[in-house]
Image (cartoon, rainbow, N blue to C red):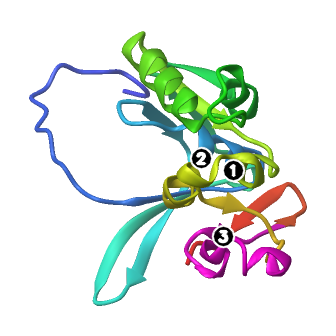
C-alpha cells in the first residue's frame, strides 16, 4: 500500500486553526494575503487555549522537519511610499494621497503592494493630512517617540506602535 493515492469522496470542512511559523519560516508571515494558499508538510500539531476556547495549532520549524510553501494569488510588489508621497506635492510637502492612489492602482492591476515609508514622512506631511495619516499608520519600532508626544499626540496611543524583539533569526512582534 505505501503512499498510493486512491479516488475517494472528500468532504470539505472549514475550521479555524492557528499556524505558528518559527525560525526561517517566520519571515513568511509578512508575505501572506487574502487568497494565498499556505502549504505545510510536517509540523507539530497541538491545541492552543485562548480565553474560553481552544484552537488547533500547527507549529512549523526546521526542528520538526517542516516544509512550508506559499501559492500567491497576487504578485507582491514593494513600494517606496516616501518617494511616492513626494512625487506630486501638496502644500509643498509630501502628499499621502499619492500612496493611496498608487496602492489602489496596483491592486486593480492584480498586485498585493507592500508599502514602506521611512520615519521622517510623518514629520513632513502637511498639517491638513497629519490626523488622517496618523489614523492609518502603525509603526513597528522600539522607539517610544516621547520627544514628539506634544506635537503628535497619536504616539501615546499604544495601539499605533508595535514593539518588537529579535531572538536569533526570529522576530517577535508585541501587538497590543
Determine which of the numbered discs, if any, sits on residue 29 in the image: 2
46 relative position to 140: left or right:
left
Residue 162: x %, y % from top left: 66, 68
Mark before the other along the chain sequence, 2 or 3: 2
Label 2 secondary element:
helix
Q: Is residue 74 visible?
A: no
Residue that badge 3 annotates:
161
| Residue 22 falls inside the magenta stretch | no
Magenta stretch, residue numbers: 145-165
Real-space Cα distance between discs 3 and 1?
Answer: 20 Å
Residue most extreme to the bottom: 52
Residue 39: x %, y % from top left: 48, 34
Question: Which of 59 and 138 lies nearest the eye of the viewer?
Answer: 138
Question: Which of 108 and 3 lies nearest the eye of the viewer?
Answer: 108
Determine which of the numbered discs, if any, sits on residue 26 in the image: 1
Q: Do tag 1 and tag 2 residues touch (Cβ < 8 Å)?
A: yes
Amino acid at each position: 500500500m505505501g503512499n498510493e493515492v486512491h479516488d475517494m469522496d472528500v468532504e470539505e470542512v472549514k475550521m479555524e486553526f492557528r499556524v505558528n511559523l518559527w525560525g526561517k519560516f517566520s519571515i513568511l508571515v509578512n508575505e501572506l494575503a487574502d487568497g494565498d494558499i499556505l502549504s505545510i508538510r510536517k509540523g507539530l500539531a497541538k491545541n492552543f487555549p485562548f480565553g474560553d476556547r481552544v484552537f488547533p495549532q500547527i507549529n512549523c520549524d526546521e526542528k520538526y522537519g517542516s516544509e512550508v510553501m506559499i501559492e500567491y494569488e497576487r504578485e507582491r510588489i514593494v513600494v517606496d511610499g516616501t518617494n511616492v508621497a513626494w512625487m506630486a506635492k501638496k502644500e509643498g510637502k509630501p502628499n499621502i494621497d499619492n500612496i493611496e492612489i498608487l496602492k489602489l492602482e496596483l491592486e486593480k492591476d492584480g498586485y498585493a503592494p507592500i508599502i514602506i515609508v521611512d520615519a521622517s514622512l510623518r514629520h513632513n506631511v502637511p498639517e491638513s493630512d497629519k490626523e488622517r495619516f496618523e489614523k492609518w499608520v502603525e509603526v513597528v519600532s522600539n522607539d517610544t517617540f516621547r520627544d514628539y508626544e506634544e506635537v503628535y499626540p497619536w504616539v501615546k496611543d499604544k495601539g499605533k506602535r508595535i514593539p518588537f524583539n529579535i531572538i536569533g533569526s526570529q522576530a517577535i512582534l508585541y501587538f497590543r
